Image (cartoon, grey):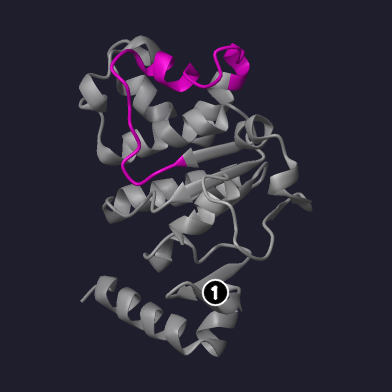
Amino acid sequence: KTTVFSLIERFYEPESGRVLVDGRDVTNWPIGELRAAIGYVEQDAPVLSGTLRENLLFGAPEATEDELWHTVRTARLEAMVTRLPDGLVTTVGHRGMKLSGGERQRVAIARALLRRPRLLLLDEATSQLDAVNEAALRDTIADAATTTTVLVVAHRLSTVTMADRIIVMDAGQVLAVGSHADLIAGSALYAELAATQFLATAPS
């Protein structure tokens, strides 16, 4: 699944078939233009030493104050900014050590969104989060999806149940495509994963 992202970003070239972005083969995009249109957040996204503002503006130093605060709200960071002693100019520490795991991930998503990407790629972005932080991040993803296309790689199904389209892959093969409800009814593998994961997290 992560290989799919690498193909989209042209870190690999396909040996067969095509990868299309906006209906255009990625090999026909100038590589700088293609990557400038993509925001990418990994499962342990780096937060840099410096202030929160510097982290957010790292990829979009020309962003306006209004754009910055709109992104802060989209990423559900407003309460955190209010809590921090110096707001956006609070120093976050080495690798963001003053922030929780969920906050670091939302900072990384905000940083990617501030660049106004055509595609936002989230690679297991919730895999290390607890249920509360994962829920907050799901809300962030849902808000982001109103203005950009979001592609999510996830083993944790709760992250993707709200997606318009889910692609079930196993050993590099696409097994099924559909909504959460479609796949519960029509994909044995997806239904088994859902039963296992949601049963394991259900209150006893």
Name above or below for residue 77 compared with residue 160. above
Find residue 73 and report its horizontal and vertical position in percent. Answer: 51, 31
Quarter of the image with the C terminus is bottom left
Name above or below for residue 189 compared with residue 8. below
Give the main secondary structure, helix, strand or loop, of the magenta stretch: loop
Left or right: 191 as drawn, with respect to 43: right
Find residue 10 and report its horizontal and vertical position in percent. Answer: 57, 45
SS for dot 1: helix
Residue 65: in sight, yes or no? yes
Name above or below for residue 173 compared with residue 92. below
- 188 or 53, nearer to the observer: 188
Q: Residue furthest right?
A: 23
Report the number of numbered marks. Answer: 1
Find residue 58 and report its horizontal and vertical position in percent. Answer: 47, 18
Q: Which contiguous range is marked in magenta?
A: 41-67
51 part of magenta stretch: yes
Left or right: 36 as drawn, with respect to 22: left
Left or right: 21 as drawn, with respect to 163: right
Left or right: 113 as drawn, with respect to 107: right
Query: Please, what is the three-letter code of the amino acid marked with disc 1?
Result: His
Image point 56% across, 69% down: which residue? 166
- 19 or 102, nearer to the observer: 19
Corner quadrant of residue 53: top left
Residue 76: in sight, yes or no? no
Image point 60% across, 73% down: which residue? 179
Question: Can you identify the residue that label 1 sits on?
Answer: 180
Find residue 159 and report its horizontal and vertical position in percent. Answer: 43, 60
**Classed neighbour count for the residue bearing mark 1: other residues with Cα under 10 Å, few (<14), some (14–19), many (≥20):** many
